[in-house]
Image (tube, coloured by chain):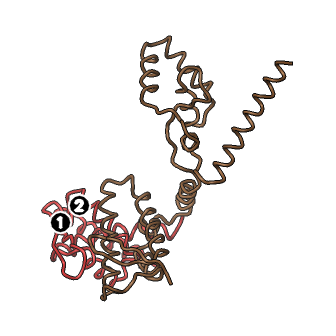
């Protein structure tokens, strides 16, 4: 027994196995990312989707038939992976593309937040530092220079303060640093928080003594 | 020097030439072009044609119209523009020159 889903590909409805759907969705994602920078990337994607619909349609004349993982694999090899499509066969670009793809899977998309745990004024510099993976101190130095050199610096800081949301939750803080949100990463984050609290308490009691 | 890459580059240029030549004969939708190119073994993976069509269209060499299909998704019928015809004429000329030159050089031994 298998779970199936209903999908609409180029306006045609198909029943598709869950594993087949996941494979197809990942494939279209790779195509989308690969051609994202080209003008008319949407057109390229919709052309390929429409061809996939045609291939499935030829095979599944009967509406009750289900698109299987095998059908998806065949369609993908017929249409080709992005690097085959663009004919980028030289090893170097293949390697760098691969690395890029890999990075994509390993890291979550980053978001810009104000960092309430790393702040002097509003946490803007801390958040920028986390986003660009640089020491927030340098961002602060830059802003201080901007404050004195131009009034623009002050205006920029205030504007950023207004538009950047504060990282309130654990998941906010993780996407601020570009970490994928999984159960184990949340656990890790909570452990770190607890360690900090413990350290603060210890410092406090030591201070009292 | 990577032979595969050179072949791929050559094939891409030749594909654009062939697509324009096919569309000069009559308008066609992507799958018809794919069939024609596959028969002549010019196409390795079908996907290749979509970025090429989009590029040719963006350059004003092709245009298209939509047509409903009874057996599948709506089809985009591509046709060549006057600019595309001029371009094809130029390509044809340089192709003739190129093949003549290559034939001349490669039959020297």
Query: Which residue is outermost to the top?
Result: A148
The chain ID associated with circle 1 is B
- Snapshot quadrant of residue A53: bottom left
Q: Which residue is mark 1?
A: B64
Instruction: Give whichever of A36, B37 is nearer the camera.
Output: A36
- The crowding category of the residue bearing disc 1, from other C-alpha atoms within 10 Å (few below 14, some 14 to 19, many at least 20), is some
Do tag 2 and tag 1 residues touch (Cβ < 8 Å)? Answer: yes
Residue occupying the point 16% across, 68% down: B66
Instruction: Give whichever of B74, A160 is nearer the camera.
Output: A160
Q: Is residue B98 above or below residue A108?
A: below
Q: Position of residue B86 (x, y in %)?
A: 16, 62
Chain letter, colour red? B
Report the quarter where the C terminus of chain A lies. Answer: top right
Instruction: Give whichever of A116, B83 is nearer the camera.
Output: A116
Q: Position of residue A181 (x, y in %)?
A: 58, 51
Q: Which mark is residue A72?
A: none
Residue occupying the point 49% across, 17% down: A146
Per the image, label 2 sits on a secondary structure element best described as helix
Query: Which residue is outermost to the right?
Result: A209
Q: Is residue A86 visible?
A: yes
Q: Is residue B9 above or below residue A79?
A: above
Q: Which residue is mark 2?
A: B57
In-image side of B104 versus B71 (left or right) = right
Mark positioned earlier in the residue sequence (2 or 1): 2
Q: Is residue B98 visible?
A: no
The chain ID associated with circle 2 is B
Q: Position of residue A102 (x, y in %)?
A: 57, 58
In-image side of B6 versus A115 (left or right) = left
The picture's colour for chain A is brown
């Amino acid at each position: 027994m298998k779970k199936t889903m209903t999908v609409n590909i180029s306006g045609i409805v198909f029943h598709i196995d869950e594993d087949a759907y996941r494979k197809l969705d990942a494939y279209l994602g790779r195509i989308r990312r690969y051609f994202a920078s080209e003008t008319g990337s949407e057109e390229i994607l919709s052309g390929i989707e429409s061809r996939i619909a045609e291939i499935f349609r030829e095979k599944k004349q009967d509406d009750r038939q289900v698109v299987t993982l095998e059908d998806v694999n065949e369609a993908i090899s017929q249409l080709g992976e992005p690097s085959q499509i663009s004919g980028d066969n030289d090893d170097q670009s293949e390697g760098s593309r691969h690395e890029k793809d890999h990075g994509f899977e390993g890291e979550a998309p980053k978001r810009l937040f104000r960092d309430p745990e790393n702040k002097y004024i509003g946490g803007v510099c801390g958040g920028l530092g986390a986003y660009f993976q640089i020491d927030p101190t340098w961002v602060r130095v830059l802003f201080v220079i901007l404050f004195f050199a131009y009034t623009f610096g002050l205006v920029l800081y205030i504007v950023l303060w207004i538009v950047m949301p504060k990282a309130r939750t654990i998941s906010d803080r993780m996407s601020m640093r570009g970490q994928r949100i999984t159960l184990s990463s949340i656990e890790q984050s909570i452990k770190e928080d607890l360690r900090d609290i413990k350290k603060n308490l210890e410092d406090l009691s030591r201070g009292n003594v | 020097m990577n032979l595969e890459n050179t072949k791929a580059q050559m094939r891409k240029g030749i594909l654009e030439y062939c697509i324009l030549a096919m569309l000069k004969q009559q308008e066609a939708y992507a799958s018809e072009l794919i069939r024609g190119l596959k028969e002549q073994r010019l196409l390795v993976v079908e996907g290749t044609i979509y970025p090429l069509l989009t590029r040719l269209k963006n350059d004003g060499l092709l245009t298209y119209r939509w047509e409903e299909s009874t057996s599948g998704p709506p089809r985009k019928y591509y046709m060549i523009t006057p600019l595309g015809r001029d371009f094809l004429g130029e390509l044809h000329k340089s192709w003739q020159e190129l093949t003549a030159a290559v034939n001349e050089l490669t039959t020297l031994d």
